[in-house]
Image (cartoon, rainbow, N blue to C red):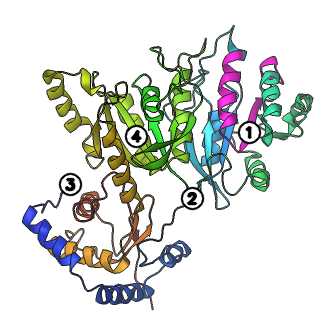
Amino acid sequence: MTEEYDDTGSALDNELAERLANLDEELAAKRAEALRTGLNDYDLDEEDFDVLSTVTDNPDEIQYLPAVPVIAIVGRPNVGKSALVNRILGRREAVVEDTPGVTRDRVAYKGEWHERKFSLVDTGGWEPDAKGIDASVAAQAEIAIDLSDLVMFVVDSNVGPTSTDEAVVRMLRKSGKPVFLVANKVDDVRQEPESASLWSLGLGQPWPVSALHGRGVADLLDEILTVLPEISAVAKREVGGPRRVAILGRPNVGKSSLLNKVVGEERVVVNDLAGTTRDPVDEQVELGGKVWRFVDTAGIRRRVHLQQGADFYASLRTSAALEKAEVAVVLLDVTEVISEQDIRVIDLVIESGRALVLAFNKWDQIDDDRRRYLEREIEQDLAHVSWAPRVNISALTGRHMEKLVPALELALESWDTRIATGKFNAFLAELAAAHPHPVRSGKQPRILFGTQASSRPPTFVVFTTGFLDPGYRRYIQRRLREIYGFEGSPINLSMRVREKRKR
């Protein structure tokens, strides 16, 4: 049974907040330094020392990781793209079935090879059509290529080059991106000569691999790392300049109307047909006396033969926009029930670590009955983002648009927040004193030292002598929010369980 350690009472909250506010910061810093020194008695690894080297008491120091490079895997249905994704990841994440065109919600996966991190975009999920397969393959490949730093073009070496492959090659040449031609299903050395026919595609050397057995994949990855940039050129993180806002939401919730209202002109085509916008549009806008950069990621135009593919594009575009953005405004249509798709978009924002504002659109169109039901839906379906600022607006009429700027500023301020190491350790000590972690298997895990490893989003690392229950971790996160706010920002909390060094 999960314990929730619920000691939330306003009196207790106020007492704790007051004690932490009146903390002797110099003394707290000295205590934290003593705790840090005490870690030397424990077995620490290189990653631990990397984390500890970032410890700072400068609240204005902002650190966050650069955007990882993006590799797109493209090719006809059933050539083994998903099997190759799983082989590279070293785990079964992408759905692999004999049926071509199996759709999935997730399209981007985090991979690593020789300590180099990258994002892998699997362009599966096609809806192949005997007549329109060239069009559907090309449309998918076009978007994936556009949003990547490097492309792996997978071909079935047993089948050889097809007219569809040639259509994709023309697009690859135009893109100017580095391309690796992967000849899949070469399961042993006797099949290698068959991949020679792929030279005719004009993409240079084919790399014979077997995604199923892993043959040749390591050599291919070694070669890819020599070409892959350290930091993504597509999803690069910009520092400084106007704060970047992504407008997200399922198709037809009013994303383009919101951008048009913010910009003050008909900048984006607005149509009742869901998914009429294809490209994200960057727009610098003055709002609330500040300049912002808005990215409209409204869905992708539905093309013939691509009914299922439209969700794939929307997901891919959303992921790319989030890489560029600092804060996401997720638009929800209050005239409709909160859907799984709405929750999926919100979860993508949390997963990406971006700040979050929830904008309830078409507020001028609901009556009291719908309002009551909506409150219940918010309570049930959006409980996990109760920390996100909420604004009720009408993108079409501009009603309550002035509330958007304070919500964005609040979310970004939380996202940038850094708690000094002395304060954070004093906070942890207060929590442990009020509610010690329960004894597990005769032992009680202790918190040795904690630090905020980075901001954007606030990321905390806690060194412990044993595993902390999920309930206890939630308790720490909840108290962090109650004391320090963090409204509109996800909080990451990771543990490092370490044992005492044997003398």
Image spot of residue 210 (x, y percent): 73, 39
Image spot of residue 207 (x, y percent): 82, 41
Residue at 56%, 75% (x, y): give it.
46
The amino acid marked with disc number 2 is: Val
Residue hosting label 2 = 239
Q: Secondary structure at mark 1?
A: strand
CA gap, disc 4 to disc 1?
33 Å
First to last magenta residue range: 135-164
Asked if marks 3 and 1 touch (Cβ < 8 Å), the reply is no
Residue at 58%, 16% (x, y): give it.
306
Q: Secondary structure at mark 3?
A: loop
**In this picture, residue 236 sits left or right of residue 26:** right
Residue 38's place in the image compared with 122, above or below, is below
Q: Is tag 4's residue or tag 1's residue first in the polypeptide sequence? A: 1
Residue hosting label 1 = 152
**In this picture, residue 430 sits left or right of residue 460:** left
Image spot of residue 371 (x, y percent): 17, 27
CA gap, disc 2 to disc 4?
20 Å
Q: Is residue 367 magenta?
A: no
User: In front of the other: label 2 or label 3?
Assistant: 2
The amino acid marked with disc number 1 is: Met
Other residues around mark 4 within 10 Å, as few (<14) / some (14–19) / many (≥20): many
Q: Nearer the viewer, residue 371 or 84?
A: 371
User: In front of the other: label 3 or label 1?
Assistant: 1
Residue 276's place in the image compared with 491, above or below, is above
Q: Quadrant of residue 375?
A: top left
Residue hosting label 3 = 2
